[in-house]
Amino acid sequence: MLHLTLFLVFGAVCLAGAINLLVQRHPINSALSLVAVMAALAGEYLLLGAEFVGAVQVIVYAGAIMVLFVFVIMLLNAGEEERTRGSHIALLIGVPGMLTGSLLIAWVLLHHSGTEAVGIGALPGPPKALAQLLFHDFLLPFEVTSILILIAILGSVVLAAKPEPSQEKEN
């Protein structure tokens, strides 16, 4: 009963953080809400018995990636977001599309959730086996991801750089 209660509490924190992320007008507040979402997800992973995934969630996403996001937000000096009324076409197509997609996902989860019992040997192995997969079998995608993050940082620096005033020669 305690696990279910904690699971629901972490789920509520995750949902509240996600809603707060969407309604905030300042990007730093949105980034901090995303940190709360990621921390709540780490708590969910811990309750599900995936300690390694929970630790990676905190270290990589809530730590490193969010520091990168905050760094880029501060570098670009992003101010408060301007609100517009939006598009009528987005309301006409987006809302029914979102409702249809949500119902489809709910139906798939309810009818094909795979909640039957799992044997002990069927679960993922220890962190050593995960490390073997990450740093041996999937090394190239792992390194490509790090290069893409580096390119994103360099792109934000280029976008944030202010052009130097042109120095005209005096005749």
Image (spheres, helix red, strand yellow):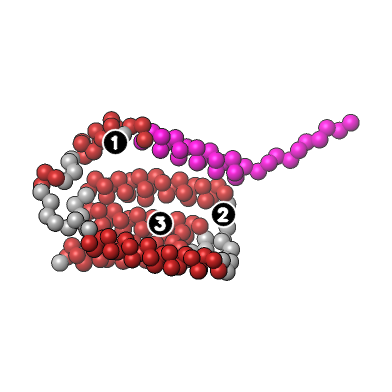
Instruction: Locate residue 170: give its quadrant.
Output: top right
129 left or right of 103?
Answer: left
Give the mark toward the camera: 2 or 1. Answer: 1
- The part of the chain drawn in magenta is 142-171
Q: Is residue 147 magenta?
A: yes
Report the Cα–Cα distance between label 2 and label 1: 35 Å
Q: Nearer the viewer, residue 57 or 114?
A: 114
Residue for badge 2: 78
Residue drawn at point x = 36 percent, y = 58 percent = 37
Q: CA distance from mark 3 to mark 1?
A: 25 Å
Q: Residue at x 48, y 65 (%)?
A: 93
**Above or below, 94 relative to 141:** below
Q: Is residue 101 left or right of residue 115?
A: right
| Disc 1, SS | helix
Say which amino acid is labelled 1. Leu
- Any mark on residue 134, and which? 1
Q: Which mark is residue 34?
A: 3
